Amino acid sequence: MNGGVDCPQLTIRELDVAGARGPLAARLYSGVAARIKKDVLVVYFHGGGFIKGDLDEADVFLRHLAGGALNQLVLASSYTLATEQPFPAAVEDAHAVLVWAKKNKVKLGWTGKQLVVAGIEAGANLAAVCTLMSRDRGGPPLAGQILIMPMLDPGLSTCSMREVKLDERTAGVADTCAASYRGYLPNGFDRTHPYASPLQSSRLKNLPAALILSGEDDPLRDEAEQYAAKLAAAGVATTLKRLAPAPLQDAGARNDCACKAAAVDQIGRFLAALETTVKPS
């Protein structure tokens, strides 16, 4: 997503962060009182079906998200695309960025108190997987996860995905998702790995609180909502919100939907609740 937003108090810094195998381009957004250290850092991963996408894709959305925030920073990070190296390169990058952020809190202007991971579509897959990796690897501690219309089912087997396949106008979306997974998971046995498909994981306990935003007319709707149900059943504090349909010029432009005030409001409420209910990391 490109374009500007009128946020006169917004500070944006371009920087490099450490991925699993080298530096990655990143962008730090800070709203009101940028010079004051913030207690919450949201690390965000872009969409693009694992095979494309960059920092500009969600720039408008993140400007909205950070522009009115009093006590949070947003760090958008790139990651290795599947066109360069398939799974698990992207998820290893994503987790490495969280580790880097924890070690470099002074550089970021963050107190280190609460770390939240977020993303949209393929980026939301990485965000969800990061919670599993952080739990399994002993850190860094995460206060929450925000999954916006996440890609979680390489099998593309949900009802909402099958409905899209049967619709001539939108069948291309399912084909695009299938091509994305073929690029990201060229080895078939990886498709059931919990770090590739968290929806398939049977170990979802002891994960951070989750906000999951699905889309009424999104083919990823059912897998997002199924994952929310599985998290809740595992004892994870989970908030699920289904976003109303939004008129999109591009059927795959999910960020346009995410930019809507309702989504930004839901995220703001979730982060505010974390500050009052979750112990600092």
Image (cartoon, grey):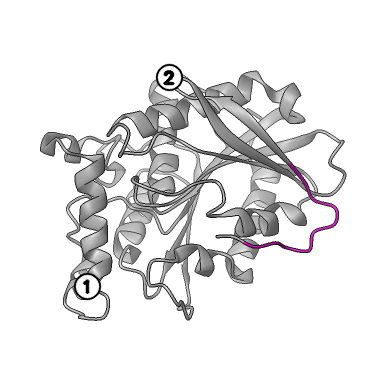
Residue position for label 1: 171
Q: Is residue 162 above or below residue 180?
A: below
**Which part of the image, by quadrant, shows the C terminus?**
top right
Give the residues drawn in magenta, as a range: 3-12
Q: In this view, does 5 lie above or below 9?
A: below
**Horizontal side of residue 66 vs 215, given as left or right:** right
* Amino acid on which the number 2 mark rests in the picture: Arg
Q: Position of residue 8 (x, y in %)?
A: 85, 57
Q: Nearer the viewer, residue 43 or 144?
A: 43
Is 4 a magenta residue?
Answer: yes
Q: How far apart are marks 1 and 2 (CA)?
A: 37 Å
- Residue 42 is labelled as none
Residue visible at 12% across and 39% down?
Answer: 188
**Horizontal side of residue 252 vs 271, given as left or right:** left
Residue visible at 40% across and 74% down?
Answer: 216
Q: Which of 233 and 89 is in front in this view?
A: 89
For marks 1 and 2, the one nearer the N-term is 2
* Amino acid on which the number 1 mark rests in the picture: Ala
Disc 1, SS: helix
Majority SS type along the magenta span: loop
Q: Pointer 1: residues within 10 angstroms few (<14), some, or many (20+)? A: some
Is 253 a magenta residue?
Answer: no
Q: Position of residue 58 (x, y in %)?
A: 56, 55
Residue position for label 2: 21
Q: Where is residue 143 in the image (x, y as percent from the top left)?
A: 58, 37
Q: Pointer 2: residues within 10 angstroms few (<14), some, or many (20+)? A: few
